[in-house]
Image (tube, coloured by chain):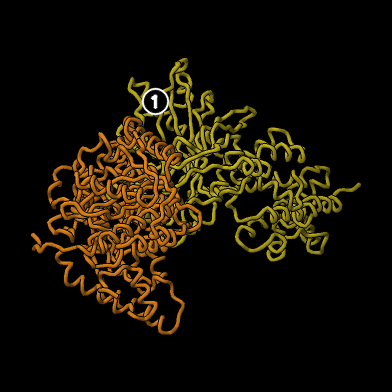
Chain colours: A orange, B yellow
């Protein structure tokens, strides 16, 4: 097999099962790469090499004894630092959780542990997942492996950079308004946001409860399906978890890769980069997306334009609903029970200590959203802001429902632009928010959406988004796999194989 | 800070009170509202906690179905409409005892609405309209260390116990209750009493007020008689005994009257009740209170109680206190007034259990409303807190009825029971309290009395039969009350009065 640190997780899994590689070898290879390159990339917040090697050893030992192991056993993995991990530092990218060692595992972390995966470390992210570039991390800057002067997307930018740079074979991200799909797009990865409720939120540090979903960020569509299957399924600890069987995803990906999309009805969303809606989109992004649509058509798909007028309102609606929920979800960070406590020197009363803790513990973007959300929920403004945004959300859901009468999937670019230079948008929150334009509708409607690479523009990856009805995640995988296979065949190699980071010292 | 007070009688010459109550009841479910932690009272601080009820990052709530069932049963017992679709909401505010920075409660979509509870007081019936019954979670408990008041101001530091955080709490809210006039304090008390009886009958809570299982926020306002508008109300928080409910209304009526008399306005605020003085003092002012920013709880799905389930719960409701009272009154052959005494003394269950243990209704009533009420009052406790069971009271009554002891000896036997010496028969045995029969000892005592009081004996012999009382007394004294007075009198007559 090819180099361990550029393999797909599925290939690693096969090599581990056949005995070609041991988990320790694979894990060490990744730890070596992290040691060599992560100073430049900045993908990880915490890496525990010893713990990783110890769990790799125990998997190898179990395998040597002939224990029945699942297909993911021994495969290393990175988790976005929003995922609570027992005994392992978890900060959600925020100073306010500095030093916190959780006493419990998120359901998805527990499932991955039980599946025998090896945790390499926790990846950087925008503080509390609020951002589209990972520049809002309270800890460090993460660089795009395609061009280290550029952002890796966000908020799961540590995960996207780690996987693209070969510092992890795959990773878990979370997506509230696009935080899996957009960084995947900007780094040439596959990223899938599952149907809301299909992956447990128990143990994900909440940003916006009605939107948050965890999902895979991987090098291939098949890997995404495998990782998704490993974490999906009903969880009695999450009341919004859907009680339905784990969908068959890997099989859909394999079938999709055969390239037959005959009869598939594809809707190209006008409002997401179509005629009259191209403001803010890179021409290169629109060209790659159009080529992807043409490829789908070439594989037998019937393509038509679909108008979803309410999608134009997704951005303002999202930036009311998500901050509203966040303002409440982040209220627990008061310095009383865990994490940072500031100013408790006997000279200040309770309110002052709580206020100072939040003042010092939260970064500017988090504060901005808490203020926005607090305002939107205030008595007298609730109906005009939060209430109105919920109505828009209903309209967006209705646009999807109407579209499903005519098409099986909806497609669009994942991000209006390719990765932008670090620092170029930090002073313009509105420009930053616009990065989520294409990903927000699926988030607000709770439907599944995948981003799959569709080529390069200006030497940087472009992502193509495929959205499907709720619980039809398998369609996303089928179509994405078909597109991936067709492109790889045309290109002669996977997109990521073309990664050639420009040498650049961190500034 | 002392308040000027107006005499209650005088208050009522000028003002009409309106009261309202918000009562919080901790349900007796085995586990908490949104997690599996135990709800047992009195455990070591913070031993009954988990990521969910500590509000750790990432933890999520799951609704306790037993708590929903209890809430619906309470709603049904209060004649409420049960919502077919109900949601939780977040009530956002910062305080260390709410670990998530919000309380998961219900706001505009409660489980139960529009019920009522009829209160009987001195032969009058007062209908209390119930606005809503909803379910929420309790907070943790703050302990402020140092400082004089036990409140946060002036404390050196504070400790928080989260064992109570997340215990299911039902809130029962009345509509404003007008038209109670001078009876306002008693109506408030009677309402909470009746509510408590219902909760006990339903078995949804232990309703131990001293443990904080049931706490009422008592709203009181005064309006000038004849005024079309209601006055500004105050809310006395966390009043946790029946007596305090009554006292807090009375105090607020007297205080507010003085404020209004002085031409000032009553400040809408929360107030604290002080058991020792029976007074209230200002808490935080509502006018500067937090905006709770309620919004639907996104971590929970709506509750949609199935109509069939609700009807099954309705059909399975136990006999409720009002119906039970009517039945028992008829069975016991009591008048309304006699029954009311029992109820007002909080002795219905005790009397009924005593009857069930074999006592006659008359004896059971006499014991609980007489001797036992006196004992409870003397030691400042509730009847239910006395260390005597209805079964033991029935046994005492049986001993009296059988002539084993007389009333006075029975009281001595009760002393022994209360002192933990065992059941009445055992105490009678161990303390040697049985009435003396026509025994040698009694004969000796009778003859000694005659010999020791020759003057009195002569008077009796001479026909002044009333004087025999002094001799009876002397015998009772030497026998330390163990003799039966009638027997003694007969024995004396046999010896002194010639027929």
Q: Is residue B430 above or below residue B457?
A: below
Give the residue displayed 54% in from the left and 56% down from the top: B30
Residue B309 placement (x, y as % from top left): 62, 44
Q: Quadrant of the C terminus of chain A?
A: bottom left
Residue A135 placement (x, y as % from top left): 18, 53
Q: Is residue B150 left or right of residue B309?
A: left
Residue B273 placement (x, y as % from top left): 41, 40
- Observer-nearest of B104 and B74: B104
* Residue assigned mark 1: B232
Q: Chain of mark 1?
A: B
- Observer-nearest of B123 and B104: B104
Looking at the image, the residue that sits furthest to the bottom is A65
Residue B411 placement (x, y as % from top left): 67, 53
Q: Is residue B18 left or right of residue A10?
A: right
Q: Is residue A81 above or below residue B90?
A: below
Give the residue displayed 40% in from the left and 47% down from the top: A468
Looking at the image, the residue that sits furthest to the right is B499
Name the image quarter holding residue A62.
bottom left
Q: Is residue B221 above or below residue B135?
A: above
What secondary structure is found at the residue carrying circle 1?
A: loop
Give the residue displayed 81% in from the left and 43% down from the top: B465
Q: Mark 1 Cα within 10 Å, few/some/many (few <14, many 20+)?
A: some
């Amino acid at each position: 097999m090819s180099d361990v640190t550029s393999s797909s997780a599925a290939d690693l899994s096969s090599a581990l099962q056949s005995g070609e590689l041991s988990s320790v070898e694979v894990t060490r290879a990744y730890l070596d790469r992290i040691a060599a390159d992560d100073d430049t990339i900045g993908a990880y917040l915490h890496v525990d090499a010893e713990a990783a090697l110890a769990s790799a050893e125990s998997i190898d030992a179990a395998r040597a004894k002939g224990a029945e192991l699942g297909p993911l056993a021994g495969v290393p993995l990175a988790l976005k630092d929003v995922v609570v991990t027992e005994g392992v530092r978890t900060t959600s990218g925020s100073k306010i959780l500095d030093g916190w060692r959780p006493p419990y595992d998120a359901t998805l972390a527990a499932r991955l542990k039980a599946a025998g995966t090896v945790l390499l470390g926790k990846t950087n992210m925008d503080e509390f997942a609020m951002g589209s570039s990972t520049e809002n991390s309270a800890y460090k800057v993460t660089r795009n492996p395609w061009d280290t002067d550029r952002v890796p997307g966000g908020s799961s930018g540590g995960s996207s950079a780690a996987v693209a740079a070969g510092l992890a074979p795959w990773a878990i991200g979370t997506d509230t308004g696009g935080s899996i799909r957009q960084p995947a797009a900007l780094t040439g990865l596959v990223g899938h946001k599952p149907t809301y409720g299909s992956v447990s939120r128990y143990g994900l540090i909440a940003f916006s409860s009605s939107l948050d979903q965890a999902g895979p960020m991987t090098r291939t569509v098949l890997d995404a399906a495998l990782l998704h299957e490993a974490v999906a399924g009903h969880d009695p600890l999450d009341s919004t978890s859907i009680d339905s069987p784990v969908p068959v995803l890997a099989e859909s990906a394999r079938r999709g890769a055969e390239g037959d999309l005959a009869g598939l009805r594809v809707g190209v969303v006008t409002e997401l980069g179509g005629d009259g809606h191209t403001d803010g989109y890179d021409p290169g992004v629109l060209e790659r997306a159009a080529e992807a649509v043409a490829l789908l058509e070439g594989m037998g798909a019937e393509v038509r334009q679909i108008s979803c007028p309410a999608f134009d309102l997704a951005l303002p609606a999202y930036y009311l609903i998500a901050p509203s929920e966040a303002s409440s979800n982040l209220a627990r960070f008061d310095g009383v029970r865990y994490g940072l406590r500031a100013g408790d020197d006997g000279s200040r009363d309770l309110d002052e200590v709580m206020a100072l803790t939040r003042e010092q513990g939260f970064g500017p973007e988090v504060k901005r959203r808490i203020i926005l959300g607090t305002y939107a929920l205030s008595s007298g403004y609730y109906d005009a802001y939060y209430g109105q945004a919920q109505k828009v959300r209903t309209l967006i859901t209705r646009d999807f429902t109407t579209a499903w009468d005519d098409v099986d999937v909806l497609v669009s670019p994942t991000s209006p632009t390719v990765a932008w230079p670090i620092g170029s948008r930090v002073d313009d929150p509105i420009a930053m928010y616009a990065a989520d334009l294409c990903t927000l509708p699926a988030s607000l409607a709770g439907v599944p959406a995948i981003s799959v690479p569709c080529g390069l523009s200006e030497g940087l990856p472009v992502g193509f988004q495929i959205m499907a009805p709720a619980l039809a995640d398998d369609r996303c995988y089928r179509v994405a796999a078909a597109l991936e296979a067709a492109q790889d065949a045309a290109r002669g190699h996977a997109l990521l194989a073309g990664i050639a980071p420009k040498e650049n010292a961190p500034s | 800070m002392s308040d000027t007070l107006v005499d209650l009688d005088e208050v009522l010459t000028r003002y009409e009170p309106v009261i309202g109550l918000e009562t919080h009841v901790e349900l007796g479910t085995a586990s908490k509202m949104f997690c599996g932690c135990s709800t047992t009272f009195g455990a070591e601080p913070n031993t009954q906690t988990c990521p969910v009820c500590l509000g750790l990052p990432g933890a999520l709530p799951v609704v306790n179905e037993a708590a929903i069932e209890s809430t619906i049963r309470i709603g049904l017992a209060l004649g409420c409409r049960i919502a077919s679709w109900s949601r939780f909401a977040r009530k956002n505010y910062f305080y260390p005892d709410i670990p998530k920075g919000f309380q998961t409660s219900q706001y505009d979509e409660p489980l139960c609405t529009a019920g009522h509870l009829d209160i009987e007081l001195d032969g009058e019936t007062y209908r209390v309209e119930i606005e809503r019954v909803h379910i929420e979670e309790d907070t943790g408990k703050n302990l402020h260390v140092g400082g004089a008041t036990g409140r946060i101001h002036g404390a050196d530091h504070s400790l928080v116990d989260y064992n109570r955080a997340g215990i299911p709490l039902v809130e029962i809210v009345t509509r404003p209750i007008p038209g109670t006039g001078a009876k306002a304090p008693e109506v408030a008390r009677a309402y909470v009493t009746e509510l408590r009886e219902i909760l006990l009958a339903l078995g949804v809570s232990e309703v131990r007020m001293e443990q904080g299982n049931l706490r009422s926020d008592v709203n009181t306002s005064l309006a000038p008689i004849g005024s079309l508008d209601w006055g500004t109300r105050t809310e006395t928080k966390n009043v946790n005994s029946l007596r305090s409910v009554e006292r807090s209304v009375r105090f607020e009526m007297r205080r507010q009257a003085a404020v209004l008399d002085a031409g000032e306005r009553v400040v809408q605020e929360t107030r604290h009740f002080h058991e020792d003085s029976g007074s209230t003092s200002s808490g935080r002012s509502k006018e500067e209170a937090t905006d709770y920013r309620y919004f639907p709880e996104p971590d929970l799905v709506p509750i949609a109680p199935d109509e069939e389930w609700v009807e099954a719960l309705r059909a399975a409701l136990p006999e409720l206190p009002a119906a039970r009272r009517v039945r028992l009154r008829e069975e016991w052959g009591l008048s309304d007034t006699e029954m009311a005494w029992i109820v007002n003394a909080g002795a219905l269950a005790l009397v009924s259990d005593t009857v069930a243990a074999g006592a006659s209704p008359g004896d059971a009533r006499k014991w609980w409303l007489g001797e036992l009420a006196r004992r409870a009052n003397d030691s400042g406790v509730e009847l239910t807190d006395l260390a005597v069971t209805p079964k033991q009271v029935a046994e005492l009554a049986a001993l009296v009825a059988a002539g084993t002891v007389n009333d006075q000896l029975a009281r001595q036997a009760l002393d022994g029971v209360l002192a933990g010496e065992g059941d009445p028969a055992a105490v009678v045995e161990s303390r040697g309290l049985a009435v003396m029969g026509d025994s040698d000892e009694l004969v000796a005592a009778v003859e000694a009395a005659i010999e020791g009081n020759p003057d009195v004996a002569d008077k009796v012999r001479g026909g002044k039969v009333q004087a025999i009382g002094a001799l009876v007394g002397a015998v009772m004294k030497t026998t330390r009350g163990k003799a039966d007075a009638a027997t003694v009198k007969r024995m004396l007559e046999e010896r002194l009065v010639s027929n």
